[in-house]
Image (cartoon, grey):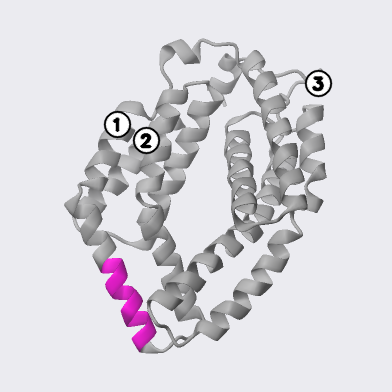
Amino acid sequence: MAAGYQATVLQLVRRVMAGQCSPDRVHAIRTHCRRLQALLELCGDEKRAVVMAHSVRRLSKLRALHVFQQYLRKIEAPAADVAALDLRIVAKQQHLTRTQAYRKIEQAVWKHALPTLTHLNRSLRDRLEVLRHVHGEHLKCLIATALKKSRRKHLHALRLALKTIRYQTEWLPGRRGPKRMLMKRIKQVQALLGRYEELADFRQWGTELDLTMQARIRKDWKRARKRARSVPAELTWLVGALASGHLWIGMDQKRTLLGLEGVRTL
């Protein structure tokens, strides 16, 4: 599966370098790189995980601008506003081409996307026990901080932690139905936090671009902020699931973790 993600990213990057850039391709490159990053972190291959994370960040601004473009079209913004943003997107794409960002992503994914044999030979059981406790404690700290002072940076940190947990859960064995529902629930929470993060950017960029839709953007931003601030208080179920081992158990009746060979056969 990891090799499949690697091949997909390489194919997408090469298409973009050939001039076939689209919002969907940029989003797919980032998503698959994040999945590979989650696997590397799961295996304890931190150096390679950092390389994948850097590849994701190279395209973060372009992805955000694409989402802003979709938002302006959805709210039927004036043509002049959309055109102003289109120029900014073109400038960003030209910058990525000029700095060979896609070539660097291609090289990173080719060389570093898969865990090394040394890390693959580690005990998955021990690694998961450590990780679920680390994630649980980190999540508790983030929730406590966000409840005390729900600033944008605190909610963003919480969102990133949830994203890591979800992507790592994707790689692990488990009953398909419950696992799918659990990941869907995490994704819904992520979406609330992500929408607030997006609109906070939109509000700033709208001012920079002198858009006429500032009032609408501010209204949507306030609504998204209210919803995002309600998230931390509703995440105790996830902390409990991590503490109990419910998230990352194997599929056998004894509720023990599968070994690495078991993961390879899925």
State the SS at label 1. helix
The disc labelled 1 sits on which kind of residue?
Answer: Trp
Q: Is residue 47 above or below residue 192?
A: above
Left or right, 245 with reference to 47: right
Q: Please state the extent of the stretch shown in magenta in the rendering.
A: 80-90
x then y, percent, for residue 67: 45, 66
Residue with the mark numbered 1: 110
Q: Which amino acid is tagged 3?
A: Gln
The percent coordinates of residue 137 (x first, y second) are 73, 31
The answer to whether one can see residue 235 in this image is: yes
Viewer-nearest residue: 266 or 56: 56
Q: Give the numbered dot on residue 94.
A: none
What residue is shown with label 2?
6
Task: Let me know if residue 5 appears in the view.
Answer: no
**Residues at marks 3 and 2, CA–CA distance in whole angstroms:** 33 Å
**As shown in the figure, which amino acid type bears the numbered disc 2?**
Gln
Q: In the depicted view, which residue is nearer to us: 140 or 129?
A: 140
Identity of the residue drawn at 68% across and 50% down: 184
Q: Secondary structure at mark 2?
A: helix
> Does 62 sit left or right of 98 as displayed?
right
The residue that mark 3 highlights is 253
**Gap between marks 3 and 1, in whole Å?**
39 Å
- 83 within the magenta span: yes
| Left or right relative to 35: residue 156 | right
Specify whether residue 144 is painted magenta. Answer: no
* Quadrant the C terminus occupies: top right
Decide whether the magenta segment is chiefly helix, strand or loop. Answer: helix
- Pointer 3 local density, CA inside 10 Å: few below 14, some 14–19, many at least 20: few
Q: Secondary structure at mark 3?
A: loop
Numbered marks: total: 3
Say whether marks 3 and 2 touch (CB < 8 Å). Answer: no
User: Where residue 206 sits: x, y (%)?
Assistant: 44, 76
